[in-house]
Structures are given as structure tokens and as C-alpha cells.
Image: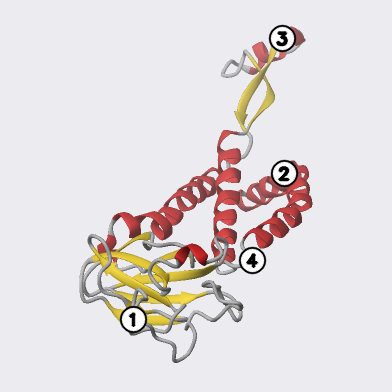
Amino acid sequence: MIAIELRNEIRKFILDRKSWLTASVGISPIVIISLLLHVQENLHLLPLGLFLSFMVFIFINSIYILVARESTVGNVIQGKDRTEERSVLKYQQLQLYAIVLKYPQLQPYAKTGLIVSVILPLTVLIIPRVVPWTGVPIIETRKVFSAQYPFESTKIVIEKGNKVEITVLGINPNWNCGRFFPTSPAGFQNEQYSDTVDPQANVCALIGSISSSSPQVYFLVGAHASFVAAEYGTLYLGCNDSIGKFADNPTNSKLTVIVVVGK
């Protein structure tokens, strides 16, 4: 009996939400296209966006089920004997509408969905940043501009012993550091100059530094770098150009990187 009532409520819920679902389906392609255009260099964010969209969907529908009410005809003589009930029912004005739960059988599932849709995103997105010792890797995306000097902080704090992985996103990524043509994140091969930020790395290469104050010691990142942090500090990323010549670099020339920090 309960299974039949539950099935009927699910069918009722689907029919009630049909117009809302139809509107959502009609809008979603536009939203997805806009999202793809906006994050064309950050397609790795698409699974996260879909995950959050699904959690929002569960949250909204759980709230709807919990608060939905409907009116049903009742009467003031409930609880009295049948003789008195028959006499009272002669008078329609004594009937009234009782407000009851619209989906009583779905209430436990809605409560579970509400809890999951709140706790799961907190667990995946917020707790690892607030409580680093959870061991869950922190994944951040940053844009690094070739014209930026001094290097701008990524605001990603690295602990000593952390495993750090930095990857440049995109197919054949490149940027320009004031030359006639752009180059890859590895920079111009076999071109090292004493007046660049890091004389040991190729000019125009993507380089980084981990420092608790201003960067002093740099390391080559290139298109990809993976290492265990030897010290505590904030991660800095930038272009290995000649100091004093960053103003010649196009202000819109950039690389998009993803940084993964784990234990």
C-alpha cells in the first residue's frame, strides 16, 4: 500500500513540476553555451559546474517537496459519531478546507536530499580549504600575465612538504613577452640572459617562486612542473622577462594554469 502511495506521489510530483522542468530544459542549452564560451580556457571547470547544478537541482526540489501544501475538504465534526456527522453534512457551509502536506510519502527522501545537497558541496569545495589537514587536494586556476611585474601573488599558500603540480591549460598554449612572435610556456630555447628575473631559465618562460614575503628564488615551471615544496610560502607565477622591460609586453597576453596542492 505504501509503495503504491509513494509511486502515486512521485507521478504527481513529476506532473506538478513538468512546466518547471520544461522551462529548465529550454533554458539550459543557452546556459551551457554561455558557460562554454566563458570557460573555453577552463573546460576542466565544466564537471564542477555540472556537479553544482545537480546539487542545486536536488536542493530546490527537496525544498519544494518539504514546503508544498494542498487544501483538502474536511469538516468540523471529525471525531463525532456518524449520526451527528450525517446531520451536520447537510450544511455545506460547515465544511472547510484543511491544509495538508502535498507529498507526505516523499518527506523523508526530501530531507535526505536537502542534507546531501548542502553537505556534499561543503565537503568537496569548502572544507579542504578551511581545514587543510583533511588531505583532500586543493585545486585552483589562475591567469598569469606576461606584462605583470613584480609577480602577482596567486594567493595559494604552500606548506612545506606539500606536493605541488602546476599545469598550463590549453592546446599549444603561448604568450608574448615583447617579441615579434609568441612562444610556448617553455620560453625561447637556449636563450638565457643575465638581466632576466631568473637567469637560469629561458627568456619568456613561465617561472614561479614560493615565498613568505617578496619572491627571491625562482624555479622553472614551463608547461608543467611537479615537485615537493621545500619551504612554506605563497606561490608566485610570472614571465621570465628582462627586468625593466615588462612594459613592452602586451597587457592581454596570458597563460591559464591549474595548480593542485596535496599532502
Q: Does residue 189 appear to the left or right of 193 in the view shown?
A: right
Tell me which amino acid carries mark 4.
Answer: Gln
Q: Quadrant of residue 173?
A: bottom right
Q: Is residue 63 above or below residue 14?
A: above
Q: Earlier in the sequence, mark 3 or mark 2?
A: 2
Q: Can you tell which mark lies on residue 19?
A: none
Identify residue for label 2.
17
Left or right of 66? Residue 84 is: right
> Residue visible at 37% across and 76% down?
196
Name the amino acid type tagged 2.
Arg
- Name the element at disc 2: loop
**Amino acid at the residue labelled 1:** Ser
Alpha carbon distance from label 4 to label 2: 33 Å
Distance from the alpha carbon under mark 3 to that under mark 2: 41 Å
Residue 104, located in which quarter of the rendered image? Answer: top right
Which callout, 1 or 4, points to the residue nearer the camera?
A: 1
Please name which of the two marks, 3 or 4, marks the residue nearer to the observer. 4
Disc nearest the viewer among 4 and 2: 4
Mark number displayed over residue 194? 1
The colour scheme applied to this rendered structure is secondary structure
- Which of disc 4 and disc 3 is earlier in sequence? 4
The residue tagged 3 is: 87
**Residue occupying the point 35% across, 76% down:** 195
Residue 40: numbered disc: 4
Lower sequence index among marks 1 and 4:
4
